[in-house]
Image (cartoon, rainbow, N blue to C red):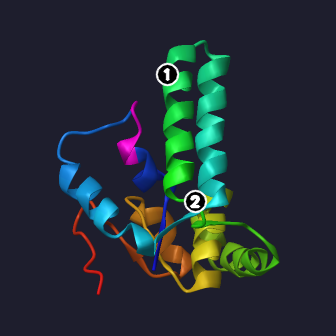
Amino acid sequence: MYLLDTNIVSADAPTKRQVGVEAFAAWLRANSDRLYLSAITIAEIEAGIARMVRIGARTKAKHLRRWLAAVEHFYAGRILPFGVEEARHAGLMLDRARAHDPGFEDIAIAATAAAHGFTVLTANERHFAPLGVPLANPFKQLPVIR
């Protein structure tokens, strides 16, 4: 099972779509039953939408809000909360990675993956590597799911 980092989910956002992600998008659809999100990802995307509203980019915010609703619908039942077990993992990771100064969001996503025995899919290997969770960068190589 895989927990998608925010940068992986956002690769398909209407404001960030990139050329060449078609194979990745097809892979996501084909393997959706094994892919999960963290509630932290929802918070990060909401923060981005709020920022757009604050700076006056209301049309972009509207498109992102619609896209986020579709993401939440697509991952219904597969959005994992950040609870006590995840917080315990996060505390251990905070100590382990202190010298690397990771952000709370990355720690919370990694802790959620650790609590559930998942691998993190991220393009941000540098931030996740010191956290001690299995990770894969699907933009370098799509994982083979058996």
Residue placed at 43% from the left, 75% from the top? 34
Instruction: Report the residue marked by disc 2.
Output: 76
Q: What residue lies at 43% left-to-right and 72% top-to-bottom?
A: 33
Q: Quadrant of residue 27?
A: bottom left
Alpha carbons under labels 1 and 2: distance apart:
24 Å
Q: Is residue 103 visible?
A: no
Q: Residue furthest right?
A: 84
Residue 77 visible in the picture: yes
In the figure, 68 relative to 83: above or below?
above
Question: Which region shows up in magenta?
Answer: 11-15
Badge 1 is on which residue?
Answer: 60
Q: Secondary structure at mark 1?
A: helix
Amino acid bearing label 2: Ala
* Disc on the earlier residue, 1 or 2: 1
Give x and y (percent) for residue 122: 41, 63
Callout 1 touching callout 2 (CB < 8 Å):
no
Asked which secondary structure carries label 2, the reply is loop
Q: Nearer the viewer, residue 62 or 91?
A: 62
